[in-house]
Amino acid sequence: MSWDVLLLRLPDDIASVQDIPNDYTPPPLGRQQDVLAAVSQAAPEADLSDPTWGELLGPTWSIELNIGEEDPVDSIMLHIRGSGDDVLTPVFRLAGALECKVLDCSAGHLITPQELSGWHAFQEFRDRVIGPSQ
């Protein structure tokens, strides 16, 4: 079970999925090779041996980076597992390097580095359903 967040480019006045116009198409993050270079620079410890599906491991968490095969890359879905608030540090390093926003797919709103409620709510739900992360 993962907490999924989406890295994508959105206008500054967008705060949630409800604010996105139906006809809006986000600009791409960039060419795949440029996106991979930005990911490598922001998170040099990321395993990008499969350029479509990266992995980033922390002390108590893991992040799978679903980059996909499309070129240019439109967005990156992050599948986050484990525990620890420090997992948001690489998430926002990646978002900064790619000049994009972070959308909490469960809550449907954008998050900031100080916004931990979605991550905490996911962990509480996961722990109730399948037990605490090991």
Image: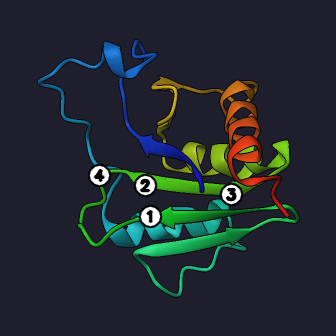
Q: Which residue is mark 1?
A: 66
Question: How far is the residue under mark 4 from the one under mark 2?
Answer: 7 Å
Question: How far is the residue under mark 2 from the one under mark 1?
Answer: 6 Å
**Circle 3: is it few (<14), some (14-19), or many (20+) Cα within 10 Å?**
many
Camera-nearest residue between 22 and 81: 81
Labelled pair 4, 3 in contact (Cβ < 8 Å)? no
Pointer 1 or 4: first along the chain: 1
Point 88% across, 65% down: residue: 59
Pointer 3 or 2: first along the chain: 2
Point 36% across, 51% down: residue: 75
Question: How far is the residue under mark 3 from the one under mark 2?
Answer: 16 Å
Labelled pair 2, 1 in contact (Cβ < 8 Å)? yes
Position of 16 with respect to 111 (left or right) is: left
Pointer 2 or 1: first along the chain: 1
| Position of 16 relative to 96 (above/below) | above
Element under disc 4: loop
Pointer 3 or 1: first along the chain: 1
| Position of 91 relative to 38 (above/below) | above
Q: Which residue is mark 2?
A: 76
Q: Which residue is mark 4?
A: 74
Point 23% across, 67% down: residue: 71
Labelled pair 4, 2 in contact (Cβ < 8 Å)? no
| Position of 16 relative to 33 (above/below) | above
- Nearer mark to the viewer, of 1 and 4: 1
Please name the amino acid that badge 4 sits on. Asp
Q: Which residue is mark 3?
A: 81
| Position of 123 relative to 107 (above/below) | below
Q: Position of residue 5 (x, y in %)?
A: 52, 43
